[in-house]
Image (spheres, rainbow, N blue to C red):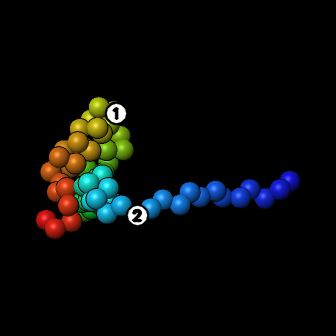
Amino acid sequence: KTKDKSKTTAVDWDPVEWNTNVVPYLARFAHSLDRFMDGPTDLHHKFLTDDTLKRKEVIRSLWMDSPADFDQ
C-alpha cells in the first residue's frame, strides 16, 4: 500500500474575495458559536434533544443577531 499524498492547489491571495465572501460568514459563525457556548445550559440541552426544525431555529436566531464583521 502506498502512502496517500495530499494535493494542494496554489491560489493567489485576493483580499477583496476574502473580505466579501469569507469574513462575513466567519465573523457570524464565531459570534454565534460564542453566544451559544456562553448561553444557558438548558439551551444546550434543548438543542441536543429538540427536533431538527427547533434546532434550525436556534441556529437561525443566533446567526441573524450576529455581526457580519469583526469590528462590532
Determine if residue 72 is in view: yes
Residue at 74% x, 56% y is 4
Q: Is 66 drawn above or below residue 13 in the view shown?
A: above
**Residue 62 place in picture, x, y as percent:** 21, 49
| Mark 2–mark 1 CB contact (< 8 Å) | no
Instruction: Give the label, 2 or 1, closer to the camera.
Output: 2
Callout 1: SS: helix
Circle 1: residue type? Thr
Q: Amino acid at mark 2?
A: Trp
What is the spatial separation of the Cα atoms under label 2 and label 1, in whole angstroms? Answer: 38 Å
Q: Which of the two residues, 58 or 51, is positioned nearer the viewer here?
A: 58
Where does label 2 land, which residue? 13
Task: Name which quarter of the figure residue 47 lies in.
Answer: top left
Among the 4 quarters of the image, the one containing residue 52: top left
How many labels were placed on the picture? 2
**Which residue is most to the right?**
1
* Residue at (32% x, 55% y) in the render: 17
**Residue 9 pos. (x, y %):** 56, 57
Residue at 26% from the left image edge and 54% from the top image edge: 20
Residue receiving disc 1: 52
Residue 71 x, y percent position in the rendering: 16, 68
In the picture, measured across the screen, residue 69 lies left or right of residue 49, that is left
Q: Nearer the viewer, residue 63 or 11?
A: 11
